Image (cartoon, coloured by chain):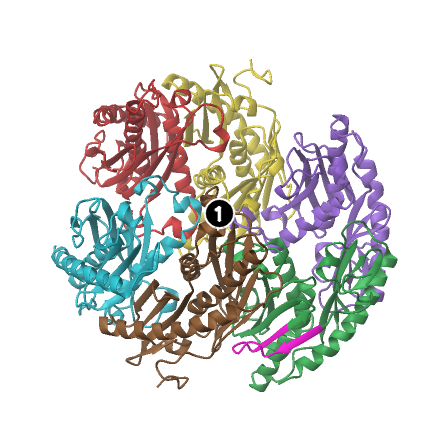
Chain colours: A brown, B green, C purple, D cyan, E yellow, F red
Amino acid sequence: MRPSDRTPELLRDVTIETGVNRYAEGSSLITFGHTKVLITASVEDRVPGFMRGRGQGWVTAEYGMLPRATHTRGRREASEGKQSGRTQEIQRLIGRSLRAIINPTLLGERQISIDCDVLQADGGTRTAAITGAWVALRQAVNYLMEEGLITTDPITDQVAAISCGIYNGTPVLDLEYEEDSNAEADANFVLTGSGDIVEIQATGEKRGFSQGEFEALFGLARKGIGELCVMQREAGARK
Amino acid sequence: MRPSDRTPELLRDVTIETGVNRYAEGSSLITFGHTKVLITASVEDRVPGFMRGRGQGWVTAEYGMLPRATHTRGRREASEGKQSGRTQEIQRLIGRSLRAIINPTLLGERQISIDCDVLQADGGTRTAAITGAWVALRQAVNYLMEEGLITTDPITDQVAAISCGIYNGTPVLDLEYEEDSNAEADANFVLTGSGDIVEIQATGEKRGFSQGEFEALFGLARKGIGELCVMQREAGARK
Amino acid sequence: MRPSDRTPELLRDVTIETGVNRYAEGSSLITFGHTKVLITASVEDRVPGFMRGRGQGWVTAEYGMLPRATHTRGRREASEGKQSGRTQEIQRLIGRSLRAIINPTLLGERQISIDCDVLQADGGTRTAAITGAWVALRQAVNYLMEEGLITTDPITDQVAAISCGIYNGTPVLDLEYEEDSNAEADANFVLTGSGDIVEIQATGEKRGFSQGEFEALFGLARKGIGELCVMQREAGARK
Amino acid sequence: MRPSDRTPELLRDVTIETGVNRYAEGSSLITFGHTKVLITASVEDRVPGFMRGRGQGWVTAEYGMLPRATHTRGRREASEGKQSGRTQEIQRLIGRSLRAIINPTLLGERQISIDCDVLQADGGTRTAAITGAWVALRQAVNYLMEEGLITTDPITDQVAAISCGIYNGTPVLDLEYEEDSNAEADANFVLTGSGDIVEIQATGEKRGFSQGEFEALFGLARKGIGELCVMQREAGARK
Amino acid sequence: MRPSDRTPELLRDVTIETGVNRYAEGSSLITFGHTKVLITASVEDRVPGFMRGRGQGWVTAEYGMLPRATHTRGRREASEGKQSGRTQEIQRLIGRSLRAIINPTLLGERQISIDCDVLQADGGTRTAAITGAWVALRQAVNYLMEEGLITTDPITDQVAAISCGIYNGTPVLDLEYEEDSNAEADANFVLTGSGDIVEIQATGEKRGFSQGEFEALFGLARKGIGELCVMQREAGARK
Amino acid sequence: MRPSDRTPELLRDVTIETGVNRYAEGSSLITFGHTKVLITASVEDRVPGFMRGRGQGWVTAEYGMLPRATHTRGRREASEGKQSGRTQEIQRLIGRSLRAIINPTLLGERQISIDCDVLQADGGTRTAAITGAWVALRQAVNYLMEEGLITTDPITDQVAAISCGIYNGTPVLDLEYEEDSNAEADANFVLTGSGDIVEIQATGEKRGFSQGEFEALFGLARKGIGELCVMQREAGARK
């Protein structure tokens, strides 16, 4: 029995709001139950040093969590003077996931910076961030095309993500915090709209887990990501 | 003529939403036109080292701005590895303003940490933060009293803040960004509900300004803060 | 009764020595009673990145305090690895105050860096630093004019500063440390030679204070700054 | 055709030397072809703050790479003043992998710190580090048991790791640098001696990849890890 | 011929002022020609962690240079966020030199922190700092004895320092900046009042140098330090 | 009697292995008894900013110690976020020592970076690093000459180093850790192949020491460095 009484293969309520920042070229506010992530996509005319002069674009991401996004207040990374290893790991994952569905040559020599800030956290913030970031990126690219700055769409596919885990011995979809912190194993899946694997991160938290268990998690993820892709298309198409 | 067609003594539309964070003991989302600040008040059982063992409480504040809160994306302070001088100056001001209306002995040996995060910035973020922070603090103290953790209300008054400035030669209330960046002088006023001065910061931006101009700004501020105090009382009293 | 037996409207003994550093283009050692601040003005041929290519100059300031400038030894900021919020707030104030009386176009594309280092602190270090910095800046600009590097004087006015406060219920001028740490309110005023406001920072330390009290402080500050301006002119004119 | 002429399912030459540090309680030098990682396991009598007082032990890991471990010299993280996101990600992975096969209660309230320093890098440094770290940990635990400090073995299983990838369209085992930097996808597998999953990290580098491809990589990893476990047992049993 | 027309074995004019800081337990301002170093000795009741509980005291030193102490303005270490390698090397040397003539048991479990801040630099700042620091330490210890906090003098000898170098092929005493930056070799000698070696740091700057040259430098240093010791005794005995 | 039963004038067993890193242009692994230092010399085509455009080369050095190189595990400087004063002091010494025997004009506008990483420490790591670094540098320069990138050898002499100290009242050569930590005085000598002084650092650890004692240490150092130079020549000449 899940804390939320969901059946194992059920997502939480997911909403994707767009146009939530009046300055950003693309933006979204994505919620998975009590998890809320605010995402902006900012178009900048320069690329990082290692990409300069190649005629190619770059997509990068940063991730942050407000100090009281969580049950107890955490320390503010800006006042600590550094980002935690966890933060860096997550923002690297978001960036890789988005670059997997961008043709950098079609983007031209410009950078799109994705900022994912967690306003409230109840598990699954990194997968929510990836799923919502695709929508913000979609809108920023729409802006570039409407402005005539690029002519061919550089987005080659959708990309979305979900977490799964083994909770009380049962594989379940879309872990909330209470499940996540007690799961025997959890896995984050990042898949394209066409079902290809972009990234899998699977971890045995309390014990190793079997290949059969892994495959059950993978199956749940496929189902969930399929549903998320429908919502992404609808949100990304909004004016 | 102001960019927003407001008359000189008019506030922008102000809204104060409460209960916007499910974990924090108090929270508010305050908007002044396009400026939006999310505030949480977190009760913690320990006080900073320099306050330990005195039987007194402490109220402190931290301030941050999301990278794309502004017209062009700014750098994330957490990845820069330090808070700017501006950020530190603002969070010190917020903390001092709130401590001015708290009786630390009645609070008991606990800390209330106020986090003010700017989701969108169009001028006046520090004064919005102070005004909204009083509401979040009010609710956190209500929580402590409802839980029976403190018996006498340690909040001795309201505190609210507004910016004023001289724009095109005219003293105006509640500067938005376009006014702020072109003002000849600006001033932030922090006053109590009973009209006492908690803090004044007045700066000639393009030229020195006269005592008469200063007094005109002070008069506008009194009017604006009076209106804000009405809204604060209404919001602070919500369940 | 003040600890020093001064009447409320009396400055401490103030001295301004010049030519105290043989390398700097301008320098001064200013004392207010036991407070001693050593100031150098260094002319540099480059401006910060955000000013480059505009044909305009820049004046900036840094502030520091020797570890044993105070009653008990403080930590050395260089070994701590960062400047405190207080230090940053003060050096930003000094820089703004000086830029208020400089015509950047007449200065030409060069920077004058003002270093204010507190050798001994007994209250009022930031206002002493501003007052002494004008003298060091005056001498550095004299040097530029004597060398024929600029032809029209870019300094448009004097600027000086003083602190006031309410001590035992009485408004008093030029707080020393013992007064400052027990004041009910204090205020720093930065005025031009012609009496315009450059900056006001007023803070209720123990309680809010009334507009009447504020005006009394302002009146004291006008008197004190008038006296400081006389001393500045004499010191700035020295060879 | 692989650069080394290996068949797809072949490991590089692997060696595990033990007793390579005269001070550490356990140590190993593991090589996979030209990749060389020096590992020490240090027993310390204190645990991190969050573990104190629980009567349980902790295993943690740090990872570093000598500046000229790679084809061109990289910057030294100690002089840079911070560890890269990649370094933090890797050392977190090593720590989690080892904690998966340790019973913390049997270890008692002490910490074993694993230091993995890459002397030379030719791909696969993180998986080599995990595989060699188990041997160093094994020897450090043997030391604790021989000294009579613990009586029941806290190591519950072996843990080893290998990378696989799709190179020129073919799934291959144990990528060296030239393969790794040109792979279409790569995956790191961390499995226990009994074949359970501890961690999977799979990434599409140039394209998404299919579930079938993923399964082929998993099969190769099982085979390779089986061979590594034989070598680990032999090395861990040495005096 | 030396830039200052001094003969090779001549010190610059040296002065040692005492009582230059009204808060510090001991203080001195030492000048060697244009080099000026302000030194305070601060008595603190706690010792560093590694010394706690031994009933012994500790003497430590910190060194800094004001940004415009030198011909061209250097960067402020506090705003840089770290002390340079040179700064750390110098402050470690000053601390070791003073600990060589202190009996830590007689000092009791307290720390004396020596702060050496260079107001103006013209070569020889580290040796001036050591020589002046002994005087500040002497006065701080006198204070402890006068207050009855310690009964037996923990200072076992004097310690003073001087630089020498080979300039235009000639061994000379007490290098000023112009000589120092063109010397073929230089050496800093730290000797006790009784002539024992506390520290020698000798460096060939442009070429290696011979043992005979080294001995000539040593002879000059003995002479100079003898003269400095006379001045130290006079200054240290002042009330 | 020395802990190792060596006579006072005897070096520990010294070995110098070359070609220990397949990527570096020069490399060596030097051992003095249980002290082991791995050294690489990396040729880079750019020089530091302050050397640019002069047509001259630069040799620099960095030094590090693996956390468990020592009897008890030390903290990793990369995770601490800074290099200790000791580390900086040592790497500055190594760089100066090597620059003393390089003609920068013959090297051409390129940098050789020397990385010295201590794998195991039993005293004398800095002197071992200098001695081994000459061999790595020798090989890197041989590479540049064989590749035809430079035509005249920029290495003007050998440079080697050894520590000596007064242990139980007796001057002894090549201190191991147990001796070093109990020595009354120690000294590091860096001499050229032709016997000139490059650097001397002599310190009284427990007491000042006499000129006669210093001369005895110098004599031992000359003998030891003579033996090291023979080994260097043999190692540097290897293919």
Q: Quadrant of residue A196?
A: bottom left
Looking at the picture, how far across and down is residue F43, in whole percent?
A: 35, 32
Q: Residue at x 62, y 73 (%)?
A: B29
Looking at the picture, how far across and down is residue C189, in whole percent?
A: 78, 54
Looking at the picture, how far across and down is residue C227, in whole percent?
A: 85, 46
When the figure is inspected, residue F153 is found, relative to residue C90, above or below; the finding is: above
Q: Which residue is mark 1?
A: A48
Q: Residue at x 47, y 22 (%)?
A: E165
Secondary structure, mark 1, is: loop
Q: Pointer 1: residues within 10 angstroms few (<14), some, or many (20+)?
A: few
Answer with left or right where residue D161 lies relative to residue B181.
left
**Magenta stretch bounds:** B14-29
Viewport quadrant of the C terminus of chain B: bottom right
Q: Amino acid at mark 1?
A: Pro
Q: Residue at x 21, y 47 (%)?
A: D2
- B232 or E22: nearer the viewer: B232
Q: Residue at x 86, y 51 (%)?
A: C223
Residue B24 included in the magenta stretch of the image: yes
Taking the view exactly as shown, the residue that stands out farthest to the front is A151
- B172 or C237: nearer the viewer: B172
Chain of residue at mark 1: A
Q: Is residue B150 visible?
A: no
Answer with left or right where residue A215 lies relative to residue E55.
left
Q: Is residue C109 visible?
A: yes
Q: Quadrant of residue D165?
A: bottom left
- E163 or B207: nearer the viewer: B207
When the figure is inspected, residue D214 is found, relative to residue F233, above or below; the finding is: below
Looking at the picture, how far across and down is residue C122, in whole percent?
A: 69, 51
Residue C31 included in the magenta stretch of the image: no
